[in-house]
Every structure is written in C-alpha cells, then in structure tokens.
Image: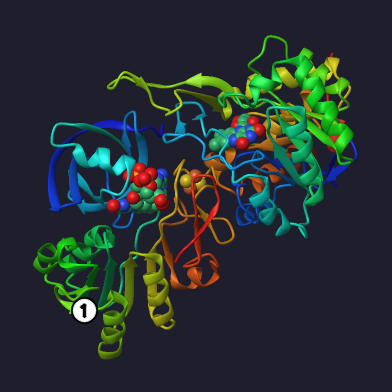
Amino acid sequence: MNIPIITPIQSTTLETKDVKTITFAHPAPVIPGQFYMIWIPGVDEIPMSVSRITLKTKAITFRDVGDATHQLFQLNAGSHIGIRGPYGNGFTIAGKHLLFVGGGTGIAMLAPAIEHARKQKVKTTVIIGVKTHQELFFEQHMKRTGATVYVTTDDGSYGEKGFASDLAATVLKKEHIDAVYTCGPELMMKTLHKLCKHIRFQASLERYMKCAMGLCGQCCVGDGLRVCVDGPIFDGTTLQKITDFGKYHRDAAGRKIMYK
Amino acid sequence: MVDISTTIGSLRIKNPTMLASGIMDEDAGSMHRMIRSGAGAIVTKSIGLHAREGYPNPTVLELEYGLLNAMGLPNPGIDAYEDELQLLKKSRVPIIGSIYGATPDEFARLADTMQHCGAAAVELNVSCPHAKHYGMEVGCDTQLLYKIVTAVTEQVTIPVFVKISPNVTNIVEIASAAEQGNADAIVAINTVKAMKIDLETRQPILANKTGGYSGRAIKPIGVRCIYDLAQHIKLPLIGVGGITTGQDAVEYFMAGASAVQLGSAVYYRGPDVFRAVCTELKDWMSAHGYTNVSQLVGAALP
Ligand SMILES: Cc1cc2nc3c(=O)[nH]c(=O)nc-3n(C[C@H](O)[C@H](O)[C@H](O)COP(=O)(O)OP(=O)(O)OC[C@H]3O[C@@H](n4cnc5c(N)ncnc54)[C@H](O)[C@@H]3O)c2cc1C
Ligand SMILES: Cc1cc2nc3c(=O)[nH]c(=O)nc-3n(C[C@H](O)[C@H](O)[C@H](O)COP(=O)(O)O)c2cc1C
Ligand code: FES
C-alpha cells in the first residue's frame, strides 16, 4: 500500500512570518534528504523534505508560497494531514570536513544531514543564504549542533552581504573541504557545482511531482532520471550529465520553464 | 533459437513488450531511458491540442492489489511535444503517438502532427476513464468512435491503433466500430474505473475522486477482453493490463494478443522490467518448445 495515512499534527513552530515547522508522529526510519508527500485533504498533496528526525517523530519545514502550502500553514497541533513516504534516496554523508550551503528554505532539509554529521563528530561548516534578515531561520539550531555557521543576506541586513555561493567560494579556497551538500535555488546550486569540479558534491533538486512513485514521468530530468526515486539528491558527476540542471524545470503540464 | 520479435499488422517490433501510454513518456529523456531499458516500442503520453495540467494530487495510489490513478491527461500540448519527438527521430525503436481529443477533426489534426514528427503509428486514446469530454466519453459512443477512426485513417498513412476501455457492457461492439473505421489494431485495455476512500476523513483520496485501476488486479479482466475480441475482430490485438512477468505476456498471447504493453509493472519491478519480461518470455518459450511468438498467439482460443 502506498497511500496517505491520516496523522495528527503534534506541534507547530513559526520560524519566520511565512515559514513553519510541523511535527508529527512517524516512527519509520528516514534518511536526511528524503521527502514525504503531504496530503491536505480536499486541497492537494505536495512533496516536503524531512527537516527534523527523532526516533518517534519527524518534521517538515516549509514556506507559504501558494495554495497548498498556505492551507498547510493555517494548521495547528491537533489538525490532521495525510503522510506518505519517505521517498527518494537521501544524502551520503562522508568526509572529514563538510560544507553545507542552504539557500532560502533549503537549510530546512539540510538540517537533519548537518545534525547527523555532527553526531558523528565530523567538522561541519554551514552557510545559510537568505535575501534579508527577516527570512533567516535555523541559525541557532545549527549553531547548537556545534557546526561553524555563517549567514549571508543579499541586502546586508545581517551576516555577510552577498550570495551564499560567494561565501562558499571563499571557504573552499581557505579550508580543505571533502564534500559539499546543497539545497536552494537551482542557479545557486549550479554555481556551486561549477566550484566543486574536484570536490564531492551532492545537491537536492526540486521538480514538480505527481506520483512520487517513479511512474508518471512528471519529475524527470536528464535522460529519464526520476527526481522522486533516483533523486532528489544527485551527485556532481550525475549533474554534469543532466543538461536541464540550472536551465529549466517543467510545470504541471510538462511545459519547460526556464530558470532566470 | 527463440525469436520474440512480433508484428502488429505492418509494424514489426524486435520484442513484444511495449511501454504503455502515460508512464515515463512525457519527455524525450524518459522515453530514451525506457528504450535503453529494452522496450520493444514506446507509446507516448496521450497528447492533446492544448496543454493540460491534469488534476491536483493525489493522482496515483498503490492499493493492495494494484494501482489507482487519476492523472487527468496532463500534457504540454502537441506543439510543445513536437520538440520532444524531434529528439527521438533517430530512435532505434518505433515511437507510437498516443492522442486524445473530443472530435474527429481534433484527432485527425493530432494524428497528422504525430505522423509528421516521425511516429511509426498513432494510438487513439478513446478510453481514459476519468477525463471529462475525452477518453471513454468519446470511446463509448460507437457512432462518434467510427467517425473519429475514419477521420484519422483518412488523414494519415501510418497504422492507427485504437485503445479501448473495459468499462463498457459490450467491448466487441466498440472494437467493431473501430474496425469498420479501418483501424489497424485494437489495444485493450485501459484502466478500470475505481475508487479508494480514506476512512478517517470519510472522503475519496484521489483529488478527482474516481480513477483508473491498473496492475496485477486487472490482468484477468484484460485477458478476458482480448479473448472476446480475438473471436470477433479480425484486427491484430495488443494486450495491456497487469502484465508484470513473461508468463503474464504468454497468457495474453494465448488469448489472442500479438504484442503487449506494460505500465504499472514499471512501478513494481522498475524501468528494467522490459528486459526481465523478455528474458522470462524466452525462457518459458524454450522450456515449452516454442520458437516464435506467432505460435502462441490465440493458442487458447476455441
Ligand atoms: C523533493 C521536494 C522536496 C521539497 N521540500 C520542501 C521543503 O522542505 N520545504 C518547502 O518549503 N518546500 C519544499 N518543496 C517545494 C514544495 O513542494 C512547493 O513549495 C509546494 O508544492 C508548493 O505548493 P503550493 O500549492 O503551495 O504552491 P503553488 O501555488 O501550487 O505553486 C508554487 C510553486 O510550487 C511548486 N509546486 C507546486 N506543486 C508542486 C508539486 N506537486 N511538486 C513540486 N513542486 C510543486 C511549483 O514549482 C509552483 O511554481 C519541495 C519540493 C520537492 C520536489
Ligand atoms: C499513471 C498512469 C498514467 C496513465 N496514463 C495514460 C494515458 O495518458 N493514456 C492512456 O491511453 N493510458 C494511460 N494509462 C493506462 C495505461 O496505459 C494502461 O492501459 C493501464 O495502466 C493498464 O496497464 P498496466 O496494468 O500494465 O498498468 C495510464 C496508467 C497509469 C498507471
Ligand atoms: S513524480 Fe511521477 S515519476 Fe516522479
């Protein structure tokens, strides 16, 4: 069976004015980087990466960007959502010094990977890139793991002014980094990918998803790679062959939408 | 030596396992992958004149014995899809263009473009169980179906396949209308109309409420349809519905199919299912002393 299971929301946390974390009971094991399909009955079902992993509970952290996320945003402890998953492959976390680069809400799905790395006592550097200070979340949470945390803002309202990928370039020059993990706007990830020709690289891709079961073909990139099953995490070598990476994605009808 | 190549009228394919419409076939890259996975032919996603987003999610569920879907015919529209087809022009295996419309004229225009883009055949989707004004709604009206098939066969020179629905009282009557319209083959079956209700929220889970059931659960329905058709229709038949192993394919051949299509099996056994089914088919045939698929076709018929 692969159907949404109605689950009560255990708690919610407002991270910023439009980012919320929803925690629910879910005892099954999950790998950082995997995602759930979240059913808001009567509205839609959307992919959401796991943002917090404990033995008995899991969480998702999301931005209110449209119809389904807006409805989800209104829900509080005790409300019910449908959960299915986890889906996808998840990160492979290995190396002596790791760099994580999260753009926008991207830090949400990197958080469990960072926590995992720190539990293994791996040296970890985290860059959180946001447009402006008001959009920043998970900074303290990441600092508590013992990682070195930097923040960039496009407008300079907090941390370093500039893009996360610019700061990443500086870190990569100064430090010996074994692997880079990223999630965020695709053009940012593309820039990082170019910086990481000789460093192990893993990026989490986002594509419009329907079945999440590797069947409908809606989420495919490159030569038939299904983001829902073969991804959402792809390594540097694979990304090299995905010609659409950083160029376009597809809407619900399968039409190409160029990144700009 | 076992030869598993087969023919559907004038179309020859190197193995009898075709990719069913709507699975991993919305873009050229996906279809490339299915070709690499060993599919003998590719049927494209059902394409219409204009882009369609399809229904909101949930669109696909896995139930105990099969899959339930209500995609709602999402597709980028024939103009955008032409770009994908151009990338497949050099393909080693035949590409069969699945199309849907509401009128004979729409079908004829779509078929014309498919032919122009190098399609080896067209498959008319007159059997989708969950799209208003399309699919089954046109495929259950024998007069309209006859007009559609006639319009398409008069428009194009490539073979015209008609994919029909099991959700009718008399499947032979529908196929006869297609035969009279000069169709070249009948494809059966599309999904079986079905529903899944969530007990906690007391509502159907699919956003569209009803959907189409596929996978192993519907294989006996598909086999029965092919068996009935084989006795009344002279056209070549293509069997679809629940085929997951080489032996499932054998069963369809014995009922009268000359080739088969696989859809849900891509979920159950992964994209490499085509190669696996072909190997199983060859093994079964050699163990039972068959050397050619044609020896199996219709073997179970009275
Ligand atoms: C594997 C994966 C993991 C994700 N994890 C997170 C996460 O942890 N936090 C987070 O905030 N967001 C995440 N997203 C993005 C999230 O799924 C979309 O923001 C959400 O679907 C928007 O739905 P909506 O109805 O609110 O917006 P809409 O108004 O419907 O659309 C806004 C945009 O969201 C995207 N979108 C809509 N529906 C889907 C869908 N079914 N699949 C993919 N994208 C869609 C489209 O690109 C669209 O342009 C993830 C996406 C994927 C593919
Ligand atoms: C997700 C999904 C999408 C489908 N989309 C189409 C479609 O666009 N056009 C069509 O003619 N059939 C479509 N079908 C039906 C299949 O082509 C096939 O007839 C049916 O699933 C039975 O075969 P199976 O049991 O091997 O899946 C779809 C089936 C599934 C599961
Ligand atoms: S969402 Fe259907 S194949 Fe990935």
Lateral position of residue A138 relative to residue A239, left or right: left
Q: Tell me the kind of residue under disc 1.
A: Lys
Q: Position of residue A109 (x, y in %)?
A: 27, 58
Residue A219 visible to an observer of this rendering: yes
A208 w.r.t. B244: above or below: below
Quarter in which the C terminus of chain B is drawn: top right
In the displayed orientation, state which residue is furthest to the bottom. Answer: A174
On whether ligand 1 comes within 8 Å of the CB at mark 1, the answer is no
- Image coords of residue B126 (percent x, y): 69, 26
Q: Position of residue A55 (x, y in %)?
A: 18, 47
Visible in this render: residue B244? Answer: no
Count of picture labels: 1
B286 with respect to A96 (left or right): right
Which quadrant of the figure has residue A24? top left
Pointer 1 residue: A161
Colouring scheme applied when the structure was drawn: rainbow
Residue B297 percent coordinates (x, y): 83, 28
